[in-house]
Amino acid sequence: MNRRTLYLKFILAYIIFGVFGTIIVSSFVSKTVYDNVLSRKAESYYREATIIANTYAADLYQTTRTLEEVKQQIDDLDAFLSAEIWIINPSGRMILSSGTPLNLDEAVVVEGFDPMITGNDLYTTGTFFGTFDREMLSVIAPITGDYRVKGYVVIHVTINDIEAEVDSFMRVAYLLLVILLLLSLIILVFFTEVVYIPLRKITEATEQYASGNLHYELNVETRDEMGYLAATLSYMASEIARSEDNQKKFIANVSHDFRSPLTSIRGYLEAMLDGTIPPEMTEKYLGIVLSETERLTKLTNSLLSLNNLNMKGMVLELTEFDINSVIRNTVATFEGTCEKKGISIDLVLTGDVLLVNADETKIGQVLYNLLDNAIKFSHHNSSIRIETTEKHSKVFVSVKDFGIGIPKDEVKLVFDRFYKSDLSRGKDKKGTGLGLAITKEIINAHNEHINVISTEGVGSEFIFSLAKVDD
């Protein structure tokens, strides 16, 4: 696909706009202006012709003024109006003509004169019955007396004068068109800078991302929708890149976590077979092999659990149960482990019974995972605090240890699959790194939230919410 197609369309639209604008101004606007000026001029000259017909010409026919007096008047009006003024009889015989000397001996007759030539209009255009050799605008006003038409006042003005006035109007129209085109060009330039160039950068970035270059840097520094789109696209690419990195880490972690116990199992079995391990020590090392197989089973089950959550979703069996009781039962399962490490568990529970609405089995798994983590990463002879509180129809459960903590830049990663911080690797050699990922999936399935607060070297606190059952 041609990446310049959109821009070329706008250029083409601009050219078409300019061409059609010129055509419209030169034809439609020109004709409209011409008709308007012609009609306005004709109306003005007709008013003058009517005034002359009702005054000087009427006085002439009533013999109250002489031909010389009327001739002088229409000559003056000729100079004032820049028009030729006639007084003619109904038969077409010229009585007076401005600009022409008075000559009573030589009669001038307009052949074929017909005062109805104007029809329903106030004017007519043409050579006026062949009298002129160029096109003229002519208006005819009747001279009446004794209830009859005695003659006509005819005013002629050359069309060239009207066209000159039209041209002056058209020059203004063309100037406005040029200004409009320049403004449109400014808009086009503005569009280029604000829309097209950022859009081209975004298109180029999407092509880079599609080809696998997810680290391509997209720079669109605007605070509008284009900038927001670019930022969103860049964020999406970074998230995909992070997801790919996590996937690589996922595969690496799975490979490592499977390879380590398999290597141990193979090594011990080979040692027993070739006699390196004496028969009296076989039972001990078979126990180690069994422990490693349990580790593999646990890892496999965790992977299957996560896969089922993602593929099918989680089916919850919501019931009302006492969260305090579940906490006490979960703590009881770790008594032996806590005694070995000298860890005490402090329970700060709200009330004897605190009812919540959730899946009891899965919440028990959440508490088991959190407490298991807390014990693993706590120092010997330390304590763990488990607390329940009520707030706004919610129950909040907190599991807090005072162990090694989590580095600040890794806190947001604790719920990722196979996450193990560098600080925890030495303490959690048998962990799968999937417990917290499963925990978060379970809490999310309840439409609740789980958060972590941790300080390196001080300890970690996990807090999750559940829906409280009203009393």
Image (spheres, grey):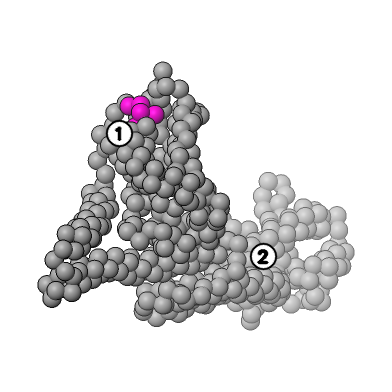
Residue 196 falls left or right of residue 125: left
Q: Is residue 253 positioned above or below 11 on the image?
A: above
Percent from the top left, x then y, of residue 14?
53, 74
> What is the C-alpha distance between the residues marked 1 and 2?
92 Å
Which of 9/440 is in front? 440
- Name the mark nearer the viewer: 1 or 2: 1
Residue 188 falls left or right of residue 361: right
Task: Label 2: state its secondary structure.
Answer: helix
Which region shows up in magenta?
321-326
Which of 141/28 is in front? 28
Residue at which label 1 appears: 360
In reply to whether residue 212 is colored magenta, the answer given is: no
Identify the residue at image location x=42%, y=22%. Answer: 352
Percent from the top left, x then y, of residue 59?
82, 55
Main SS category, magenta section: helix
Q: Is residue 454 positioned above or below 390 on the image?
A: below
Residue at which label 2 appears: 37
Quarter of the N terminus within the rendering: bottom left
Q: Is residue 177 positioned above or below 384 on the image?
A: below
Task: Label 1: state its secondary structure.
Answer: helix
Q: Earlier in the sequence, mark 1 or mark 2?
A: 2
